[in-house]
Amino acid sequence: MGRRTSIGLVGATGLLAVGLWPLTPSAAQQAKAKPQKGVPTFARDVRPVIKQFCIRCHSGPSASGGIALDKVATEAAARANSQIWDKVAVNVGSGHMPPAGAPAPSKAQRQALVNWSQALLASCELANPGRVTMRRLNRMEYDNTIRDLTGLDLHLSSDFPSDDVGYGFDNVGDVLSISPLLMEKYLRAAGEVAKQAIVLPSKPAGHYDADALRNTTGGSVEQGGWILFSAGAMVATHNFPHTGMYRVKIGAYGQQAGPEAPKMAVRVDKQLIDTVEVKAVEAKPGVYEFPVRVEAGKHEISAEYTNDYYTAGPPPQDRNLAIDYIEVVQPEAGYDGLPDSHKRIIPPDTAAGRPPIREVLKAFANRAFRRPATSTEVDRLTQIANLVMKDGESYERAVQVGVQAVLSSPNFLFRVEREDSKAAVGPYELASRLSYFLWGSMPDDRLQRLAASGELAKVAILEREARRMLADPKSEALADGFAAQWLNLRKLSDIAPDPKEFPEFSDKLRDDMMTETKTFFDGIVRNDRSVLDFLGARYSYMNERLAKHYGIEGVQGDQFRRVSLQGTPRGGLLSQASILTLTSNPTRTSPVKRGKWVLDELLNQPPPPPPPGVGDLSATGKMLTGTLRQKMEQHRKDPSCASCHRRMDPIGFSLENFDPTGKWRTKEGEATIDASGVLTDGTKFSGPTELRNILLGRKNEFVACLADKMLTYAIGRGMESTDRCYIDRISTTVRQNGYRFSSLVAAIVTSEPFRMRRPAAKGSK
């Protein structure tokens, strides 16, 4: 799916077309009000215009663009086909339709048609919360969820295939499928998480049976080990992997005779560790343990028989020492010394013994599934774990296998919203919607408790929690997830300015560009700044290298810090090097790309793709001369290019003082930069400062665009024409609250599309 949502902001901007957005009075009020003088109606203002100017091409099964206007002969039919009016409003409002050379309505007729269409689309009587396809965790969400679930920051998703993108974002359910390859990766990752999270009981670092030991004196190997008949030793050579404390375990027994038991001296190399009496007998051999600190490397461990005894009798008495094995074990640290990941899953032993494995897996599944696991689900997990233990594996290994099963379950990999007859999203599903929107990860314990109590469904509680979560460092996920895709920042890594033209550009500078924009976005979130700072902030964040690139003095070191832009032509997103670089070509700027970026990302009004056969400047087949601007003006003389270029090019030209890497310049070669432009409504302007002022003058259109994109990201589906009402409401709330970022988020999470869903039709699956 493409980046463009189905809601296009028609019109209230001199950049684009005629028309107002939002309407005054509100579109919703207009739609419900009785016809008034000056307020367009379908019968008087819409149907006659369509019949006169549109129906010839837009009727029947082969209707142009798939828009069949012969189906909307009555107002009732028009309301029943609301999706048509979204397209009508966009194309008529932008002047794209009727096509050039065809009879066209007057400006007043065009305005009335656009206003009526907007009022219909914004009418809350048409609105419904929409239906969200069950969403798989995308790569970022998977890593973040594993981190918050286990405490391990493993970044295993780097081995996963890339996520598909729909409506500009990679968390849209309609495009997040699972391939056999991805499922294989999930299974492998689940095993790796379980392995790293849970510590298994220590296994011998080295085990040496009697026949593998070196004997320094006489004796013989028997079933119980090596029998030392006289003073001597059994020796094992072991390579210790690192310096530290180890345990040496020796299996031994004595053939008892005389006044004392056989004595065994244990040495590492020549150093005596301890001497013990071996009172165990052949019928019940003993295990003798010795803690020892050893330097890394190869060392000899010896068990030495030191008190040989023999008498001829009668009866004869012979004291001997039997060595069965020597073993080296790295000691366990005890529960307190276990990693946090282990303790998050397996609680400490109690007086009753080990925690029941069923309870351990139930608690983990509750968190991983982001809802209480059912008895059936817990039964299956317990059965799996019990089978592991039945095969002789340890308790910890059984938990590992259970954890792997949980992390391979669709209930973990997908954000499942269970279908029922209710329109409200369930409490646990609502907690997940909120946490994955703001944190890109699972709900924390507080959210889960509020879901369990039902409190989270209260609008005031939901809004309070959203503000709490924005203040949490985990809200940085909004910059990585939402902002990076809204602003196209993920494409920056693929941009490579020509090193001959721009030798100062480097990978480190590219990283600094990315960091500036993400830090700028995160600063607006954390400090609850106005969203209008995206357009006109007179500050940014930079380190010494980026400041030098910008020609700003007084910034030293690699650390990013807030820097004033007063006295410079920079301000807002449009002067940041990340945006300017990713909207340029390798050897030159691209006013078209820059203009298109503004229309698409700041105004939600992307131009249509170029007509077939229309190439870029280098593919026209004509020798174009002069500056880049002059070449483009020659290019746009082509009638098939002019309609779109007259919208994009003036915006892009105003940014020409920024070169392809975002540096300020006044000349292109020997020619002075001409950064002037004329908008489609005749407004003249020049340079980035005046463009910034124009955009700030259209702040309500920007807020509606931002609300549209953020709501898409928050609920994981593209906007539909019937969502116009909700966008209108969210935008109004933001305006009424001083444009604060938190008011945007609060309006989104308390909106009907976020809290509600359209139930599945009966009989559907």
Image: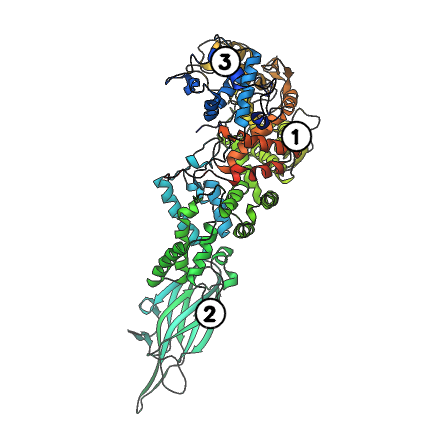
Query: What's the amino acid at mark 3?
Result: Pro
Q: Position of residue 359 (x, y in %)?
A: 44, 60
Left/right of residue 266 with respect to residue 503 in the rendered view: left
**Tag 2 residue:** 352
Between tags 3 and 2, which lies in front? 3
* Residue 290 quadrant: bottom left
**Tag 3 residue:** 48
| Mark 3 vs 2, N-terminal side | 3
Residue 118 visible at all? yes
Find the distance from the CA under tag 3 to the CA under tag 1: 47 Å
Left/right of residue 691 with respect to residue 196 in the rendered view: right
Find the distance from the CA under tag 1 to the CA under tag 2: 62 Å
Query: What's the amino acid at mark 2?
Result: Ala
Q: Are marks 3 and 1 in contact (CB under 8 Å)?
A: no
> Which residue, as the protein is rendered here, is positioned at the far right?
567
Query: What's the amino acid at mark 1?
Result: Ala
| Mark 3 vs 1, N-terminal side | 3
In this view, 283 is above or below 587: below
Left/right of residue 221 with respect to residue 667 in the rendered view: left
> Which residue, as the protein is rendered here, is positioned at the far front?
34
Between tags 1 and 2, which lies in front? 2
Q: Position of residue 636 (x, y in %)?
A: 51, 11
